[in-house]
Image (spheres, rainbow, N blue to C red):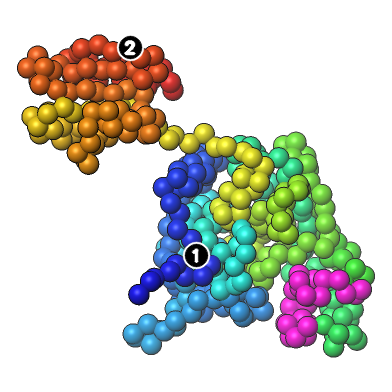
Amino acid sequence: MNFKIPRGTQDILPESSALWQYVEQKAHDLCRRYNYKEIRTPMFEQTELFQRGVGDTTDIVQKEMYTFEDRGGRSLTLRPEGTASTVRSYVENKMFGWAGQPVKLYYIGPMFRYERPQSGRMRQFVQFGVEAMGSDDPAIDAEVIALAMSFYQELGLKGLKLVINSLGDKESRNNHRNALIEHFKPRISEFCGDCQQRLEKNPLRILDCKKDRDHELMNSAPSILEYLNDESKAYFENVQTYLSSMNIPFEVDPGLVRGLDYYNNTAFEIMIDGEGFGAITTLTGGGRYNGLVEEIGGPETPGIGFALSLERLLMALETQGIALPVESSIDAYLITMGDEAKRKAPGLLHKLRSEGIVVDTDYMGKKMKAQFKAADRQNASFTLILGDEELAQQTIVLKDLNTGEQENLSLDKAILKITESKRGEE
C-alpha cells in the first residue's frame, strides 16, 4: 500500500526547515526585545472553548473545525487559532493576578482548519501570534501593531500596507449593528444563506462575506466610524497618533472587518502590495478583544493581539526573491584513511562537537577522493585528515578548503584554528 500525505498538509524537508528555523528565531528574538514571553498550549481543547471564544457565527466554528469525540465521550477540537487557547490559559492559571500587568505573551505552533487548500492556505498551518492582556491603553495597541510590522520589515519584505479601523466599544457596536440590520434586511433574500443567518446574530460579519462582496448594498452599508461614540473616537485617534509617532504609515478603512466575533475597538491588517503574490494579499490581522476573557470565565480584562501564518510569510519572501541568510555549511569534515583511523573517528568527532564545531564524516565506506567530494557537497570550511602517519605522530592534517592551505597540527591546535575561524566569520 502506498501512503500519501493528507490533503492540505506538507512535509517540510531539511532544505526548507532551515528557512522555518530562521523566521521562527526572528520571532523569538523580536518578542524578547518587546518583552513578550512564550506560551505553549495544547493542540486540542474542549470544543466549547472555540464555540464561545471564536464565535458561533464564524466560518471557523461553522465549517472549518476538526472536532472529534474522545474515549470518554468528550467533544474535543484541534485548535483552529491561538487566541482562545491563550486566553483560556490566562484565566485558568489566574494570570490576571500576576504582578507586572499587562501580561504579554506569544506563541508559535500548528493550527488546523478544514478548508479548501490553496497557495498560502493549508489545513495544518503554523501561526505566530502575540496577546497582551490587562491594559486598555491605546499605546499597547500601537505596540502590538509595531511588533507585527517590524517582524515583516526585518525579514526584508517590501510593499507592506497597514490598514486599520475601529469597531467601537459595546455601545458603538450595538448602534452600528442596528443600522446594519435595517440596511440589509429589506433585501437579505438576495444574499447567501450564511449572510441570511448572520443578519440577526452578527450582521457585521455580512461585510466580511466573500460570496456577496460585489453586492451593491455592500458599498452603501453604514460605516462603523459614523457610529463611534466620543470615547471610541478618542481611543482610535490615540492609536493613530501613536502609530504616527513611530513613523508607521497606515490607512483607515471603515470596511475592515475581522473574521472573528471577539474583536472590538482597534482592528488591523497588514497586506502586501505587489505582483505575483496571488489573490491572498493579507499577511496578518489582529485587533482588540475586550470581553473575551469574561466570555471564557475570567474577570473583566481588556486584550489585544494578532496572528500570522508562517506559510504565507515564506511565500511572500519567495515571491519577492528575498534569500534568507540561513546556514547551509559545516565547519569541518573528517576524512579517515585505514581501519585504525576509522575506529578512532567516533571519539574524535565527539570531542570536536563538544567544542562547538559542526562536523561530519563518511559512514558509507567511501574512498578518500569520494570523501573529499562529500566535504565539498556539504560546503565544509575545513577537512581534517587522519591516517596511519597522523595516528603515529598524534596529529591531524587540517586543510582550509577556502585557501587550499594545509598543515599538520595537534588536535587541540586544529580545534583552536577552526574555532578562531568561526569567530572571524561571525
Verify whether residue 291 appears in magenta. Answer: no
Amino acid type at image mark 2? Glu
Q: Tell which tag, 2 or 1, sits nearer the viewer.
A: 2
Q: Nearer the viewer, residue 366 or 46?
A: 366
Amino acid type at image mark 1? Thr
Q: Is residue 230 above or below residue 261?
A: above
Q: Position of residue 7 (x, y in %)?
A: 51, 70
Q: Nearer the viewer, residue 400 or 85?
A: 400
Q: Nearer the viewer, residue 83 or 229?
A: 83
Q: Nearer the viewer, residue 328 or 342?
A: 342
Q: Residue at x 74, y 42 (%)?
A: 159
Principal secondary structure, stretch drawn in magenta: helix
* Side of 412 where 312 appears, left or right: right
Residue under numbered circle 2: 405
Label 1: how many residues lie within 10 Å, few (<14), some (14-19) or many (20+)?
A: some
Distance CA(mark 2)–CA(mark 1): 48 Å
Residue under numbered circle 1: 9
Mark number for residue 199?
Answer: none
Q: Is residue 422 above or below residue 256?
A: above
* Side of 401 where 367 appears, left or right: left
Q: Residue at x 50, y 65 (%)?
A: 9
Whether residue 134 is visible to the viewer of this picture, yes or no, is no
Whether residue 78 is visible to the viewer of this picture, yes or no, is yes
Label 2: how many residues lie within 10 Å, few (<14), some (14-19) or many (20+)?
A: few
Do labels 2 and 1 touch, CB within 8 Å? Answer: no
Q: Is disc 2 placed on a helix, strand or loop?
A: loop
Q: Is disc 1 placed on a helix, strand or loop?
A: loop
Q: Earlier in the sequence, mark 2 or mark 1?
A: 1
- Magenta extent: 192-217
* Side of 98 where 321 appears, left or right: right
Q: Residue at x 56, y 52 (%)?
A: 310
